[in-house]
Structure formats: C-alpha cells, structure tokens
Image: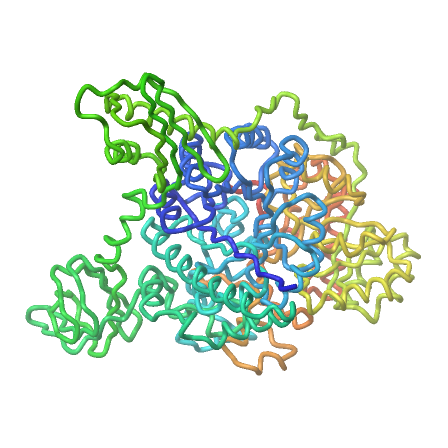
Amino acid sequence: MTRFMKKPELLAPAGDMHSLKAAVNAGADSVYIGGKSYSARASANNFDICEISEALDYCLLRGVKLFVTVNTLYKETEVGEVIEYISKLYEMGVTALIIQDIGLAKIIKTHFPDIKLHASTQMTAHNLEDVKFLKAFGFDRIVLSRELSLKEIKNIKENSNMQIETFVHGALCISYSGQCLMSSMIGGRSGNRGRCAQPCRRRYEMGCNGDIIENKSKYILSLKDICTIDIIPELINAQIDSFKIEGRMKKPEYVAGVTSIYRKYLDNVQNVICDIQLGDKRSEKGSLDKGAGALATEGSRTGVVIKDKQTLAQLFNRGNFSDGYYMISKSRDMMSMESPKNQGLVIGEVIGYEEKNKDCIIKTIRDLAKGDGLNIIARNGTETSRTLACSVDANTTFKQYIETKTDIGSKVYRTYDAKLENKLKVFYEKDIKKHKVSMIAELKQNKKIKLTVYDEKHMVNVEGDIVEVANNNPLSSEKIKEQLSKTGNTPFEVENIELNIDDNIYINISKINELRREVISIFMDKILGEYRRKKVDTRFITLKSSYSIGVKGCNVKKEITVSVRSFEQYQAAIECEISRIYVDIFEMNDDILKMIGLAHEKGIEIFVALPHILREKNEKKVYKQIYEKLEKTDIDGYLIRTVGEHEITKESKKKKVIDYTLNLYNNQSIGFWLGQGVENVTISPELNIAEIGLLTENQEIVIYGKLPVMFIEQCIVKNLKGNIACTEQEEKYYLKDEMNVEFELEKNCNLCLNVLYNSEDIFLLPYTDKISRLNVKYYRINLKDEDYESTKKIIQMHTEILIDGIRTKGTDKYIEVMKKKGYTKGHYFRGVE
C-alpha cells in the first residue's frame, strides 16, 4: 500500500494585528503570536489580552490555528501572574502554547490538560533523547534547534513519532537557542526573557595567542537568514510536520510576502508528490523514494521562479541567504560577515561623482520607483541611505545628492521596494481568505421563511417572518440569491445556495437581509463556541513547593563543589576541603578510574559531567561510555546538562545533579526535577540573591569561574583561518569587541563545537556576608585553565570564608589581586530584566 506524505503546516509569525491578518490572508495554516508580557520577542508590538481574543476569533473563523508564545523563563514572583494569563488564554480557546519553562509546562499539563503544549526552540531539543524526554513529559510538538541536519531530523521523526516543527525562513542565532547568556551577561538583557540585545550582530575581531588575526570582515558572529524555498521537497521528505517562518518583529508586508511565496511552493510541491504517489502504487517504499527523487529532478514542475527568490531577498536578507544547517553542518558561506543588516537587492553601482553639486551618478540594472529606499556601500564599508524622489528606468543613469564623495564602483542596493510594499498591503487591508459556506433557503406561501447555513462540520437553522402571496412583483430566485450572498465584512463566502421556494411569493428584502445576518451571527458563535473552554479556578492551583523553601542559610551545612578540566586541577582539588568534583566525560577519560579511588579515600564524590550539546554523531559514543564503562565504576553520579541526558541515564541508579543549562528560575521547575529523583539542581546564574532566596533550599550555585555565554555550531576559527583550525592544539583564541573587551573562544573538537566564555570570572568573596546567608547548600567553583597552584589557592580561599567563616590577611590580599585582574559579580546583585 502506498504511504502518502502528510502535507506540512505552514506556520507564520505576527507581531501585531496587521501582521496576523497578512499571515492568514497569505495562506498560513497557523499563526504564532506573543503577549505584551511573557514572550520571547519582547521588542515586538505584541498583543494585549483583548487583542489576543480578537486575533483568535479572526483565525478560527477562517480555519486557521493560533499559537501563543509563553516561551520565556519566569521568576518565582511572576509565576502566579503567568498562570492567570494562561487561564485567560485557555478559556478563550487558544490552540496551543509555546513553552520554555519546564515548571510552567508542568502546571499547564496538570491544570489545563486539554490545551496543546509545544516545546519552544529555547528548550534546546537537539537530539532523539531530548525529544523522547519531552514527549514522555507530555508535549504535543517540539520545535527543534535550528542547528540540526535533515538526516538528524528524519531520524528523530522516525524514532519518536513526535510532531516536529522547524524554522524554514528567517533569522538564525549563532548560539544554540536557550543556551546563550551573552546579552544577559553583557548588559542584563536576557534572551531567556525575550530581551536579547543581539550582541552577535556586532563587530568583533579574533585574536590568537595575543595577536589579532587580520580579517576585513568584522561581523564574524552574524549569520545570514535562512531560505529553504529550494529544498522544500527535501524538508517534506524528512517528515517535518510544521514549516515555521521566523519574524514576529518584522513588518506586515514581510509576513505577507514570505508567507504567500511559501504557500505557493508548498502547494506546488505537494501536488507533485500526490501525482507521483498516485501514479505508482506498486511499492510503498518505491513511491516515497520516487517522490523525493522526482522532485529533485523535475524542475519544470517544482522549480522556484527567480522573481520569487528576488522578492524574498528584497523583503529582507543579510547578504543573500543560506539553507541553514539542513544540508551542511557549518560553513563560512552561512555567515553575513560584511554587514548584519538588511542588504536588499543590488540595483546598480556608482559610476561617477560631481563634487561641485555633490551628485552621485548611479547606473541602474533594475526599474526603480519613487519612494524606493537606496543604500550605497562604499569599498571601505561605509554606508549612505537615501529615499528615491522619482522613478528611474532600468539600464539608465540618474543623479542622487550625497554629501560625501562616493567611490566609483560602490554597489547600490534597494532596501525598500515601494511598489512591492504597496502591493503586499492588500493582504492586511482586505479580507482575502474567506470561510466557504453553503445555504439552503425555504420560502413557502403563508409559512415562515427558513434559512440554513452549513459547512463540512457545522449547521445552523433559523426561521423568520411569514412569506406572503405576492400581489405584484413576486421575488425572483435571482434576487433571493443576490441578497443571501451579501456576506459583506463577515469571514464567510457563500459558494452555493439551494432554494426551495413557491411561485408568486413576497417578503420584504430587509427581512431576508435581517435573517441572513442572524444566521451568520449564530453560525459564527457556533464555530467559536467549539473552541471555548470552561474557566479554571486558579485559586485552587497551589504554587507552594512540597520541598523546603526559605532563607535558612545559617542552618544549612555548606559544601564546596569543583568542576575540573584537567588532571592537574583534580589533583589540587582533592587536597582541599570539598565534597564533590565534576569531571568532563571527554577530557579525562583515561584518568577516571584513578580519580575515583583517590577522591573516595578523601570522602569526595566524583560526578561525570555530560556534554552541554550532544548531537546524534556523539550520542552513541556517550551512551556507550556510560553503560559500557562508567556504570561499571564507582563514580557517584552524573551532572546532567540536557533533558536528553536525563533520558539516557534513566536506567542508572547513580545520583544525578541538574546543571544550570536547564535554566531553572522558579520552584516549580526545581520541584519538577527533584520529583524526578535528582540529588539537587543548579540554579540559573541569571537570578539575583533576592530571587534565589525565594527558592527551594539545599540547591547549588556557581560562585567562581568564567561562564560559557554561547555554544556555537559554527567553527569561527575555521571560518577565518581555514582547515588549519582542525589541526591546531595549543592556540588560545579570543574575540575582542568594539569596547576592547576580550571573550575567550574555545574549540571543543570532541564535540566539533565552539564555546564562547564571558570576559571575566565570577568572583564573590568580597560579598560573602550576603552569599553565605543564601538558602543554598552547594557552592560551585568552575575551573577552566587554572594550574595546580591557582586551583588550590582558589578553593582554599573560598573554603576559608564560606565554609570555615575565617577571613585572614591572606584572604584580603587575594581579593585585592582579583580586583586588579578584574572580575564580575555576575547577576547576583543585579539580575536580568
């Protein structure tokens, strides 16, 4: 039997009501929006609760689903407000919620069970085990990390049977979403709170061993937007359920243009798939394979029109597009290193400059219209923007006033296409998409007029006034149909009218119109009523954790834990008064048995730290390492850094500690993980001491070390230096920003990953009077490149003050040394917005 490919959903963004209408009318199957609060695009206009209700009705009456993003992390004091907000969304009938916070997701699953839950890409689901965990939790759909290949996505889909959503068009983050602290640590604007300041779009230089590497391109963290219009057949063949367009901060015209073009090609490709599958029923496997193969070769049937690709580029591009990570793992070609801004389309170049009149002479290759926005990029990278005052034909020259002399040969781009923008306004100025209905009208002499409206799922009947015998001018069938078809500004279009009428009848036209309006109104209420849900009394939702909460720091026995990166650091650590050591699974593989014995002799636990990012190519390696080696040793437990790692280790009886990379902000999240049987959790480094004080006691915080602020799939070093990057061992790389602040860039060749670290160590010893009163049990020291002596000194100083309560001259001297070196207090005394 032939297996037919399911038609994927087209999911479009909307940052305001105009954009939502544009998405619906351009052909989106579903639209995702965010509220004024609790949304990961806080800079968009977004929707208040009344606007969400209006947007929902607009969508549902046109057969379109509405998803609401509640995809940020919530502080303990905010959870109650968020639940009230969720309750309103639930009651009005929102189709699904897109969630990042695992604690909030647990509340929704428990108290609002019949609303769909989608795991946000901020949850960093990037492998099969992540997906299995989230499916078992109760999520209905997962938005995968943007870094995954089609091969990985297809493997996940085939082995999880989970609804999968991926981004097909729009901006790419350089870091794995949900794992980026760069904006947070630089300026307090957290991407986990929807307030990312986009530091990846700024200028950086790369240095190696103290020397800057010469490179003309300065935006070395800026990725091009993705455009997958050319690989739609491959995406469908990977069985992706939902094609997501990024862009809640984009204009309605952008939403209209991108959505309409993807709608066109999704429909075209789907028609070809159906033709192929219907034409070959001999083999289930054969039909699927032939479908994919035929789509790849039948350009005349599925080929993308150049004009459509140009339209997408005109709407927004950062120096052309890439296919993202779907087809290749990483490449310099994916980067927009020259400029992070919209570059539009090349329309010509500068062929001269008249200094007397300050006129720049431009030769065009495209027709231009009055109001077009132009951008001239000189050879040295400087840019000049102007608005065109009149229309210009292609292949002609024109003069544009520019104050500063412009180099001959400078490229001229059109960044705003006035004609295109005006053309796309129709998608939100008019209701193009209508819900098709049929009507049956019965008009019998001396009986009430009856009118029925119906579609495939709904039917409504109403009766009106008595139909009279006509004295003269009886009503014609044509006139009745004309009046019934006048649905005006309603969401409906009457495609078929069946009349059952007597001859020689009369009823006032106004009565027919009145009855039509009545039946349409009732029909609308019937459709919307199916989505409304019963109000949940939020007074009965308890937010109190079953685990102990409160600032009882003085009564909690404090312990020091240390994360080590070398055997030398380990040797220094076991000579100190600590309770636990975290050892990286890849970095000291050969030394692990020796380390266990020595640590246990000192009464110190040994935990193996699992990877921050675990792609398919490394999953089996880690699984094998755990169950063929580590489980047979006396290690005490695992430091879990992804939800999938908890899934991998679920059969293990050893202890588990949750790392801060799982973004724990509130007691609901902490309580969820403690309920999974973990030993303790590590609280998010984005919380301040007051916010930590409200959380379940006996947990862990990081009090020393450089925090990773980005986990990057691209190899920034290779992008600038070429393949030699893969053979280098000892080189130390860093990025320097425009303020001359340096961020260490680490090549993790075990995982083929770049890790960017904060510019300074977290250091809290000057503030131990406040830190020691926190209701935490474990203070973690995160080591990186420290040698034996430095490691021992760091641990001893923290132990003396935090554990023993002793402050000596040596301690004060050490603090002065750190002041000169420079350190950060992290967010402990500021927090994030």
Q: Residue furthest left?
A: 356
- Which residue lies at the image location 51% right of the left edge and 79% below the top edge? 721
- Image coords of residue 343 (percent x, y): 32, 65
Q: How many marks?
A: 0
1 and 819: which is toward the camera = 1
Whether residue 817 is visible, yes or no, is no
Q: Looking at the rendering, which quadrant does residue 556 occupy?
A: top right
Does 498 sit left or right of 322 as displayed?
A: left
- Image coords of residue 120 (percent x, y): 57, 49
Does 663 sit left or right of 56 as displayed?
A: right
> As displayed, is residue 203 above or below residue 481?
below
- Which residue lies at the image location 66% right of the left edge and 61% below the top edge? 613
- Which residue lies at the image location 10% right of the left edge and 68% below the top edge? 358
> As displayed, is residue 644 above or below residue 84?
below
Whether residue 741 is visible, yes or no, is yes
- Image coords of residue 192 (percent x, y): 55, 47
- Which residue lies at the image location 83% right of the left edge and 54% below the top edge? 637
Does 120 sit left or right of 526 as displayed?
A: right
> As displayed, is residue 536 above or below residue 242?
above
- Image coords of residue 422 (percent x, y): 23, 52
708 and 620: which is toward the camera = 620
Question: Which quadrant would the N terminus be assigned to in this image?
Answer: bottom right
